[in-house]
């Protein structure tokens, strides 16, 4: 007998995907999400870890509960830590015992601060020092970072919609051009046919 069972996406064992989803959702900070440890982390390490993990937890390939949420957290981690300046700030923090302990106790606060500074740099604004940093929420990740991730998705959707509209417009123009050619061809055929009818007819003898 054949017993039905759920087949995971090719190359992604179901158990492996579930394990990664649970690990990511249980992680305390973005480095843990990517499976990396300070201070020896490079931007290349961040990108490689992201590419490896995204294949396991992408909602289109992993059916485990929480896969979409894990994918979002993975995207946030990569978006922030792939910034060289942000990564350097975390490394500097790691060399300060007091700040490192603060990060270990509440990583979301510093992650939110770094996300705010990244936004400021991207916008050409002044980056605040730690002393001038505004107070950030203690528990949740940066709302600003979430908004940028959402904005990036919307931008991608807008680009895809524009591409589809341009494709449809091009196809319509091609159809109209084809119809025009057919119409011209039919008219020319009609004219040729008319000329033939108006031409000299075969001679007929008159009866005398």
Image (cartoon, rainbow, N blue to C red):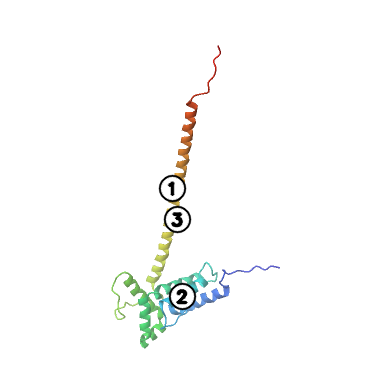
Observer able to see residue 108: yes
Which circle, 2 or 3, is nearer the viewer? Answer: 2
Please rate how many residues cluster around mark 3, counting C-alpha atoms within 10 Å: few if below 14, some from 14 to 19, many from 20.
Answer: few
Tell me if residue 139 comes above or below residue 194 in the rendering.
below
For label 3, the residue is 164
Quadrant holding the N terminus: bottom right
Residue at x-position 46% and y-position 75%: 48
Residue 106 falls in image quadrant? bottom left
Task: Judge the density around disc 1: few (<14), some (14-19), many (≥20) Cα neighbours within 10 Å.
Answer: few
Residue 31: x and y in percent read 44, 79
Q: Residues within 10 Å of mark 2 (few under 14, many from 20)?
A: few
For residue 29, say whether it is visible. no
At 42% from the left edge and 76% from the top edge, which residue is drawn?
A: 44
Q: Position of residue 183 (x, y in %)?
A: 46, 39
Tell me residue 202's x, y (percent). 53, 23
Instruction: Say which residue appears at 37% left-offset and 76% top-offset.
Output: 84
> In the drawing, does residue 41 fall left or right of residue 124?
right
Farthest residue in the top direction? 208
Q: CA distance from mark 2 to mark 3?
A: 32 Å
Mark 1, secondary structure of its residue: helix
Q: Nearer the viewer, mark 3 or mark 1?
A: 1
**Image-quadrant location for residue 87:** bottom left
Q: Say the numbered circle drawn on residue 48.
A: 2
Disc 3 element: helix
- State how far apart marks 2 and 1 are (Cα): 44 Å
Q: Is residue 54 left or right of residue 128?
A: right
The disc, 3 or 1, on the residue closer to the chain's N-terminal end is 3
Q: Earlier in the sequence, mark 2 or mark 3?
A: 2
Between residue 110 and residue 55, name the one nearer to us: 55
- The residue singled out by tag 1 in the image is 173
């Amino acid at each position: 007998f054949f017993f039905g069972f759920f087949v995971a996406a090719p190359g992604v064992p179901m158990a492996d995907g579930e394990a990664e989803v649970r690990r990511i959702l249980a992680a305390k900070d973005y480095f843990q999400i990517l499976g990396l440890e300070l201070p020896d982390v490079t931007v290349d390490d961040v990108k490689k870890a992201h590419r490896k993990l995204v294949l396991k937890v992408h909602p289109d390939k992993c059916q485990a509960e929480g896969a979409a949420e894990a994918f979002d957290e993975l995207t946030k981690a990569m978006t922030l830590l792939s910034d060289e300046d942000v990564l350097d700030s975390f490394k500097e923090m790691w060399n300060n015992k007091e700040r490192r302990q603060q990060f270990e106790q509440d990583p979301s606060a510093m992650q939110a601060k770094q996300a705010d500074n990244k936004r400021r740099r991207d916008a050409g604004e002044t980056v605040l020092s730690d002393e001038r940093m505004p107070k950030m929420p203690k528990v949740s990740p940066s709302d600003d970072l979430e908004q940028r991730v959402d904005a990036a998705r919307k931008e991608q959707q807008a680009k895809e919609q524009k591409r589809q509209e341009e494709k449809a417009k091009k196809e319509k123009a091609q159809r109209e051009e084809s119809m025009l050619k057919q119409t011209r061809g039919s008219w020319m055929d009609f004219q040729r046919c008319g000329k033939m009818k108006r031409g000299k007819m075969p001679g007929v003898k008159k009866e005398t």
